[in-house]
């Protein structure tokens, strides 16, 4: 792969090389297409961004492209090239044809604790690499975790770096951003009890992802946004659902050490990768989960699929305001 950055007066140069085949996703400022590279005949993903929707001082798009150009890891979506025109930016990446993790778990009624461990292990590997490069993602969620293909051996790919940024020991992370169901409590406390936060926010989001993969429920879920945020701030979640009786103590311990409000006690990515459950050293639950519980888990996931998307669409603390508090890319 190459990190070509092409500037043009129009979009002709982009379409000379790439053909857009079908739309596979849509967001506030962007549309994602499956495309074909005419040079290689390879399938690619193309994020078509409307530059006119960004505030003039907003550097988040430039930061996203720069961060993608700086990372190379098997568990992170790979950048191929970027075309920049006056009103459009086309970010071309490898195509993760296996779709979103959220879709995979709703389609697969037998998504097991072992499957969850394998996925989380790969997410942690990708995040460890990002943190080692002084990059915090800030928007890890089921929808931003993709699969390289639809086989059982597919690689996990972390995607969507629109809210990612570089950090350093002397830099300040202080932008209120993320998706409500996954946002860490310290982000919600910005301007109240704290002024900055750390890359530990990514670890909280991984804890939410793991909780959902294991149980089918979100640990923090309420239609009232204020109630939802209060539960997150206090770390108020439950493992009372019957399905938790069939989940190993190691998995529960991992969730608990990730969903810890005090960031000094929350596992770092390196600590999480050494957790016995993540390493597969602690026993998985050998008790067969009753079929009715598995069916209920899948039903909850399917039922939540659109509500997850709707909540994130309506309530997401959008990146339009990120430039107001973030330092510009240096």
Image (cartoon, rainbow, N blue to C red):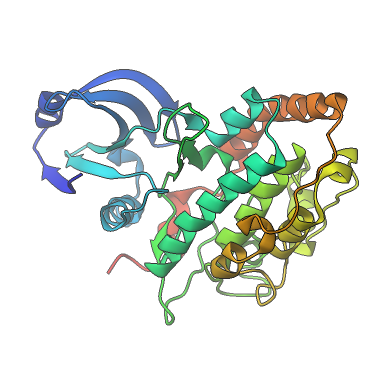
For the image shown, how many numbered marks are present on the structure? 0
Above or below: residue 216 compared with residue 230 = above
Residue 152, position in %: x, y? 53, 31
Is 166 displayed left or right of 178 in the figure?
A: left
305 horizontally vs 72: left or right: right
Which residue reaches farthest bottom?
Answer: 170
When the figure is inspected, residue 176 is found, relative to residue 245, above or below; the finding is below
Q: Quadrant of residue 200?
A: bottom right
Which quadrant would residue 233 be assigned to in this image?
A: bottom right
**Image x and y of residue 169, in percent:** 44, 81
Measuring from the top left, give residue 76's x and y in whole percent. Answer: 40, 48
User: Residue 167's spot in the image, x, y percent?
Assistant: 41, 71
Residue 16, compared with residue 137, is above or below; it is above
Q: Is residue 52 visible?
A: yes
Relative depth, front residue between 190 and 306:
306
Looking at the image, which residue is at 34% across and 25% down?
Answer: 33
Residue at the extreme top: 21
Q: Is residue 183 visible?
A: no
Locate the N terminus by quadrant. Answer: top left
Residue that appears at 69% across and 57% down: 277
Please name whichever residue, 258 or 199, is drawn nearer the observer in this view of the structure. Answer: 258
- Point 44% across, 49% down: residue: 320
Left or right relative to 298: residue 199:
left
The C terminus sits in image quarter = bottom left
- The residue at the point 45 percent across, 55 percent down is 126
């Amino acid at each position: 792969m190459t990190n070509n950055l092409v500037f043009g007066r129009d979009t002709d140069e982009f379409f000379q090389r790439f053909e857009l085949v079908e739309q596979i996703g849509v967001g506030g400022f962007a549309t994602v297409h499956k495309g074909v590279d005419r040079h290689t005949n390879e399938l690619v993903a193309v994020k078509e961004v409307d530059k006119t929707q960004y505030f003039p001082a907003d550097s988040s798009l430039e930061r996203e492209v720069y961060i993608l150009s700086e990372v190379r890891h098997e568990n992170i979506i790979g950048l191929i090239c970027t075309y920049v025109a006056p009103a459009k930016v086309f970010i071309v990446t490898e195509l993760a044809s296996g779709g979103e993790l959220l879709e995979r778990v709703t389609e697969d009624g037998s998504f097991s604790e072992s499957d969850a461990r394998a996925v989380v292990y790969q997410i942690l590997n990708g995040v460890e690499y990002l943190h080692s490069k002084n990059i915090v993602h800030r928007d890890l969620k089921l929808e931003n975790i993709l699969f390289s293909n639809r086989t059982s051996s597919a690689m996990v790919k972390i995607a969507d770096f629109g809210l990612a940024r570089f950090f350093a020991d002397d830099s300040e992370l202080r932008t209120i951003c993320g998706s409500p169901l996954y946002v860490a409590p310290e982000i919600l406390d910005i301007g109240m009890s704290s002024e900055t936060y750390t890359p530990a926010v990514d670890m909280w989001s991984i804890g939410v992802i793991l909780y959902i993969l294991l149980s089918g429920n979100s640990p923090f879920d309420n239609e009232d946004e204020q109630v939802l945020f209060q539960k997150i701030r206090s770390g108020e979640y439950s493992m009372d659902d019957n399905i938790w009786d069939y989940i190993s103590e190691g998995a529960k311990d991992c969730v608990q050490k990730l969903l810890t409000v005090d960031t000094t006690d929350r596992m770092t990515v390196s600590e999480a990768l050494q957790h016995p459950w993540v390493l597969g050293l602690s026993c998985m639950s050998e008790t067969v989960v009753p079929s009715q519980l598995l069916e209920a888990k899948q039903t909850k996931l399917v039922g939540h699929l659109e509500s997850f998307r709707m909540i994130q669409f309506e309530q997401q603390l959008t990146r339009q305001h990120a430039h107001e508090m973030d330092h510009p890319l240096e």
